[in-house]
Image: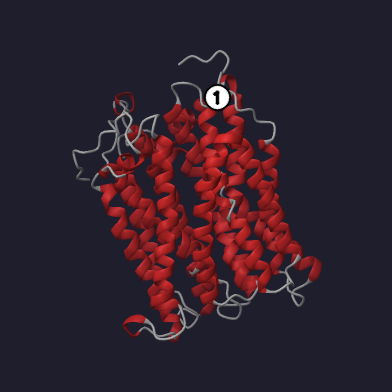
Amino acid sequence: MPASSNTSPVPEDSLSLWKTVTRWPVLAWASWDFGSAAFNAVCTTFVFSTFLTTDGLFTDTGTAQSHLSNGMALAGVVIALLAPIAGQRADRRGRGTRSLGIFTFLGIACMVAMYWVYPESPMGAMNALWFGIILLGLGNIFFEFASVNYNAMLNRISTSKNRGTISGFGWGSGYFGGIILLALLLVAFLGSGMHWFGVTDVNHMNIRVSILTSALWFTVFALPVLFTIRGVKPNENITGQGRESFFDSYKMLWGTIKDLFRNAPQTLLFMAASAVFRDGVAGIFIFGAIIGKAVFGFDTTQIMIFAIASNVIAGVATYLFGWVEDYIGPKRVIIISLVAMIICGTLVFILHNGGQRVFWIVGLALTAFVGPVQSASRSFLGRVIPPGREGEVFGLYATTGRAVSFLAPAMYSFSLYVGYLIVGKAAGYEYWGILGIVWILLVGLLLLLPVKPVKQHKNYQH
């Protein structure tokens, strides 16, 4: 793809924060994160997924949740098999930018196709539900593959002195983009009263147009990085050997893992722990709004207001905990955040009959710890990476989280099934799903506790 010549890393002199994040390559890179809220916030979390699982639209909410979680678990298996090598293959051949573009627009194509998902569709309500689940699963696969290539670009626009600042700027851009887009959709199409452009609620046209608007939003803000950041120079040792098979890719990946096991075990242990608890956090994004609507009876307007409020709280909390982290260290921030999310998730389960006030209080409290645990996780990893392998290990870190992305949907579905067996369909068992997410977070916490933030790694040579 065409590229600007202004793609050199930010210099290592004492640039101010403002100068660091306002260089064009950084702005172009963060623009993708800003636009990606169109898929994360609108499709996966707050609008399309809750639309699919609304009681009585396509089917009853318990059945819809079960089908959706199974579909997302299957998508997670595909991601687990392919994501750990997708980004590495693209970078070794210098095709990271092209791969980012391809997977981004495949995901956007899935969003556009969601326009034809509605209960009154000629294909029938259940077939429309399955079509929507397939599109959401495929969209997540394409989005995760795109994210691998996007995250790998960080080292190309930053240095060791400003990588955290630039990474945080991109992360914050995602929250900011989500707030603006969700507010726009609430005012234009999803709130009460007249909708823009004469759009009505007939055949759920307001929701379908919201998804199309989100697809356009993602397209516009994804373009800058594709025309600005070049792919890296191909690895001549790879390109000179002809086509790289998937077996070759997994062999290289396995070699990296074995080397870390021998020489940097704390790094590998932390990546395993973070892969688990980050998938639990991803489960909160996928199923949180569904629980709000199915269990606590939130309508579309309330879900959108909750979405905006949660993004604001998450953004502010991430900034504040970043300051706290400098005093108590990233591991303590992660532990505090995980414990708080486990407690909040358990309270949602226990107090599910307490009315909407419970979800407003406990749900928003939970979102305050989502950003800090992810930000501190990335910071902690920087302390246990073997010298000289920052780029390689950060790339592996980006993919390991995707490699277990089937855990949260699978545990959510299993917990729903257990709830169905214990309390039955008539009593309402949808609230049991939250326990699956709580268990994932708890396992991640237990795996994290023995990890030590050591900087030295015995016998390491590179």
Q: Position of residue 181 (x, y in %)?
A: 40, 65
Closer to the camera in the image, 322 or 9: 322
Q: Residue at 61% across / 41% down in the picture?
A: 333
Q: In which quarter of the image is residue 1?
A: top left
Q: Is residue 145 visible?
A: no
Coloured how?
Answer: secondary structure
Q: Where is residue 307 in the image (x, y as percent from the top left)?
A: 51, 65
Residue assigned mark 1: 260
Q: Is residue 187 left or right of residue 241?
A: right
Total labels: the figure holds: 1
Q: In this view, does 375 lie above or below 136?
A: above
Q: Can residue 430 be seen in this view?
A: yes
Q: Residue at 43% across / 21% down in the picture?
A: 388
- Position of the C terminus, as image quadrant, is top left
Q: In this view, does 80 lie to the left or right of 223?
A: right
Q: Position of residue 460 (x, y in %)?
A: 52, 15
Residue type, numbered disc 1: Leu
Closer to the camera in the image, 109 or 36: 36
Q: Is residue 131 left or right of residue 366?
A: left
Label 1 neighbourhood size at 10 Å, few (<14), some (14-19), many (20+)?
many
Q: Residue at 50% across / 59% down in the picture?
A: 311
Q: Quadrant of residue 116?
A: bottom left
